Image: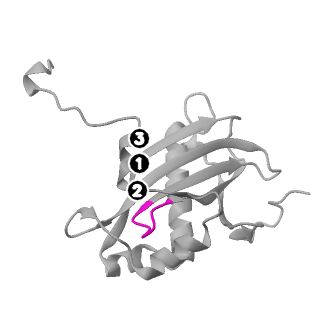
Amino acid sequence: MSIFEDYNFNYTKNDFSMIFYHKFEVRWSDLDANKHLANSSYVQYCAQARMAFMTKEKMGVTQLSRWGIGPVILHERYSFFKEIYADQIVIVSVEIDGCSDDSSIYRFVHKFYTPDGVHCATSEATGVWIDMMLRKMTTPPDDVVEAMNKYKSPETVVLSKEDFKKLPFHPHNIDPAEINL
């Protein structure tokens, strides 16, 4: 018996925290030249799973507009274990892996599963909430903090701005004259 047999669920509760799941049917347009799920589709599935999670937790697009905030992903990385093909069902989890005390910084982990529970890939996405007018990082409203807290586990790491220094890439500007096109 699979933990994913009932497709009418949105989340499960384990011993520590809530995990949100979102189901996709892989379409022809989601494939690459190798006829498996394209890298760009993994990015899109993660983003859509996060938005489904946020909508379920009453932080959808309309509410974000009212609050004047938006989520921004600053760093995303993937590990792939098993190919996913057209017409397969894939289930993507949304888990809170890290979060600042005020939830202004967050890190989601997404795991890709087949309906029989085979783990195909994992993604980690680190981001911040921004004030849409000022275009600067901000603390989200209490409703967002409460929703994020429901999905934290004892293993959820406390993040701070210092953690941005640990990300693998940093900006390095160049002289435009060096670009030969």
Alpha carbons under labels 2 and 3: distance apart: 11 Å
Side of 22 relative to 167 (left or right): right
Q: Is residue 103 magenta?
A: yes
Side of 129 relative to 154 (left or right): left
Side of 58 relative to 36 (left or right): left
- Between residue 74 and residue 155, name the one nearer to us: 155
Residue that carries the numbered disc 2 in the rendered image: 160
Please tell me in which quadrant of the rendered image residue 24 appears.
Answer: bottom right
Dot 2: element: loop
Q: Amino acid at mark 3?
A: Lys
Q: Is residue 50 visible?
A: yes
Stretch of the chain drawn in magenta = 99-105
Dot 3: element: helix
Alpha carbons under labels 3 and 1: distance apart: 5 Å
Residue that carries the numbered disc 3 in the rendered image: 166
Side of 7 relative to 178 (left or right): right
Alpha carbons under labels 2 and 1: distance apart: 6 Å
Q: Amino acid at mark 1?
A: Asp
Labels 3 and 1 touching (C-beta < 8 A)? yes
Residue for point 37% across, 47% down: 164
Residue 163: mark:
1
Labels 2 and 1 touching (C-beta < 8 A)? yes
**Mark 3 neighbour class, 10 Å CA radius: few under 14, some 14 to 19, many 20 or more:** few
- Between residue 25 and residue 69, name the one nearer to us: 69
